[in-house]
Image: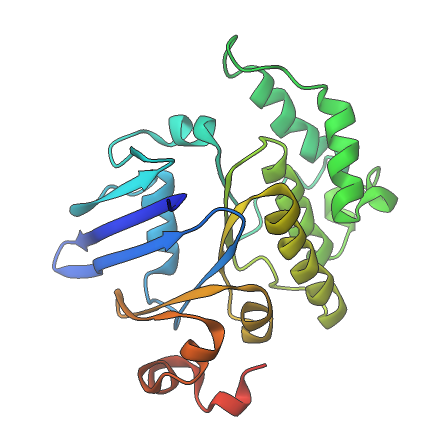
Amino acid sequence: MPLLETSGVKVRFGGNVALDDVSITVEPATVTGLIGPNGAGKTTLFNCITGLQSLTSGSITFLDRDVTKLPPHKRTRMGLARTFQRLELFTSLTVRDNVLVAGEIRNRWSLRTPRIDARAEADRILALVGLTDVADREVGEIPTGQARVVELARALMIQPTLLLLDEPASGQTEEETDQFGELLKQLAREDGLGICLVEHDMSLVMKVCETIHVLDFGRIIASGSADAVRNDPAVIDAYLGSPESVG
């Protein structure tokens, strides 16, 4: 059973159709890619999944529950977390405190939700993602590539089952991106996370994603394995260029 399923999602802004009959799935314990040209509708779809954007038609199912009309905070409490294309961090706080914020918020959600030791969990996650050495530095002092990982660490503090990552490798060096890709595969394989990745670094996408959905002008033009998508004529024409140019 899919962890997440969008079915026939359509979003219209006045006369402009941003998404048109978009149906994708994200399975648990896998990394799923969502790629396409700028303006294809990828972030809009993420906004629909998280409840920040209402649908003109269609539905969204998460954990076998229709969440189409559920507000964002309730989806989050079900285990849905995301990062954003533009960094959304507290630059005057330390790396550790940025992560702690999410843990403290989680502990206030509900008396029915088991509380966590936020500091201990933050330190565990910082070690997991390789940020222990910069934990006490202000976020504004660290490189953009590391700041992207801070966003991931903060998202992990709510103990999600589904993680939506919007261009998380932007600003990373080649070495950082390689390490990030290995981390994503580890989170899916060992922690059972379902991860949906929007990314323009095709080498990363092809290495870590088991299934890739391709958006163009608000419509899904292909879905399948990395090899299938890499060699799909419609995808080559709309986005990738020659298969040889993709890692």
* Residue under the image location 32 percent in, 61 percent down: 41
* Residue under the image location 39 percent in, 26 percent down: 74
What percent of the width, then of the height, locates residue 158?
58, 30
Q: Residue furthest right?
A: 133
What percent of the width, then of the height, locates residue 100?
69, 28
Quadrant of res 125: top right
Viewer-side residue, 156 vs 149: 156
* Quadrant (top left, top right, bottom left, bottom right) of the N terminus: top left
Relative to residue 135, is residue 35 drawn left or right?
left
* Residue under the image location 61 percent in, 62 percent down: 169
Viewer-side residue, 175 vs 170: 175
Q: How many marks?
A: 0
What percent of the width, then of the height, locates residue 146?
73, 54
* Residue under the image location 72 percent in, 69 percent down: 173
Q: Is residue 232 above or below residue 188?
A: below
Q: Is residue 70 above or below residue 207?
A: above
Q: Residue furthest top?
A: 111
Q: How is the image coloured?
A: rainbow
Quadrant of res 225: bottom left
* Quadrant (top left, top right, bottom left, bottom right) of the C terminus: bottom right
Residue 94 seen in this snapshot? no
Relative to residue 148, is residue 138 drawn left or right?
right
Relative to residue 140, is residue 54 drawn left or right?
left
What percent of the width, then of the height, locates residue 81?
50, 39
Viewer-side residue, 192 vs 221: 192
Residue 206 seen in this snapshot? yes
Q: Is residue 246 above or below residue 7?
A: below
Q: Residue furthest front?
A: 1
